């Protein structure tokens, strides 16, 4: 897992869709995640220190968890499946760690409210992050790079990669069985 920071929230100028841009904490790799308008507003609102007169949905969730003595410890972008990022929210209750499936946008909105770290699975970084050289990073350039990646990749590519992994795992299992004999 790679720790991430929120680099910013921007808009895809073509589709007018909000994007949260995560950056690796120790490098220049960026992970653009398209999100919905309500989630973008919720993330931006908290990042800018603004508050609503009454709790919004993500505030309510964090407040309920706190009242139930459940601690949010981290969120993780776990995978990219069918052009959609999936995530989990890790909580601890009575010493037991639980992983709760979540949309990545909701997990990030919870993370900023609970003030917990955001991580991305190594596979997500390898497959989807964009590396930028130098200190001056142009968000539009990152989004364009990611769009090019999505244009090149298809569901079949992911299926083929999954099959290759399965065959590799089977080969490794057979090799280890032969070593045991």
Image: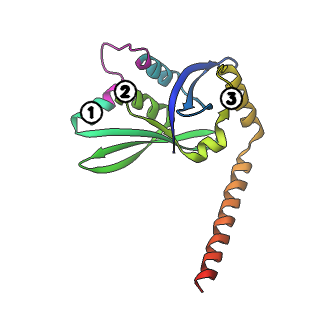
Residue 96 higher or lower than 87, as above or below: below
The residue positioned 73% from the left and 44% from the top of the image is 154
Residue 116 higher or lower than 124, as above or below: above
Q: Crowding near pointer 3: few (<14 within 10 Å), some, many (20+)?
A: some
Residue 52 in the magenta stretch? The answer is: yes
Front-lying residue, 38 or 160:
160
Tell me residue 13's x, y (percent).
67, 17
Determine the secondary structure under disc 3. Answer: loop
Disc number for residue 132: 3
Specify whether 111 is left or right of 3.
left
Q: Is residue 108 visible?
A: yes
Tell me residue 57's x, y (percent).
37, 26
Label 1 vs label 3: CA separation? 40 Å
The residue positioned 30% from the left and 17% from the top of the image is 54
Please name the colour scheme applied to the rendered image.
rainbow
Q: Quadrant of residue 175?
A: bottom right
Q: Which residues are magenta?
A: 46-61
Disc number for residue 113: 2
Marks 3 and 1: in contact by CB < 8 Å? Answer: no
Tell me residue 141's x, y (percent).
71, 23
Q: Crowding near pointer 2: few (<14 within 10 Å), some, many (20+)?
A: some
Mark 2 or mark 1, whichever is nearer to me? 2
Mark 2 or mark 1, earlier in chain: 1
Label 2 vs label 1: CA separation? 12 Å
Q: Which residue is label 1 attached to?
A: 64
């Amino acid at each position: 897992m790679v720790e991430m920071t929120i680099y910013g929230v921007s808009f895809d100028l073509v589709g007018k869709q909000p994007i949260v841009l995560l950056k690796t904490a120790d490098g220049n790799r960026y992970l653009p995640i398209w999100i919905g308008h309500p989630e973008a507003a919720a993330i931006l609102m908290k990042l800018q220190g603004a508050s609503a007169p009454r709790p919004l949905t993500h505030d309510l969730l964090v407040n309920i968890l706190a009242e139930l003595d459940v601690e949010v410890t981290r969120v993780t972008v776990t995978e990219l499946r069918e052009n959609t990022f999936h995530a989990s929210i890790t909580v601890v209750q009575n010493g037991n760690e639980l992983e709760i499936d979540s949309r990545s946008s909701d997990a990030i909105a919870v993370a900023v409210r609970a003030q917990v770290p955001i991580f991305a699975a190594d596979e997500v970084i390898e497959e989807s992050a964009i590396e930028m050289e130098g200190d001056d990073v142009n968000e539009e350039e990152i989004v364009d790079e990611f769009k090019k990646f999505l244009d090149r990749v298809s569901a079949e590519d992911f299926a083929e990669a999954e099959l290759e992994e399965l065959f590799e795992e089977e080969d490794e299992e057979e090799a280890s069985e032969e070593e045991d004999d």
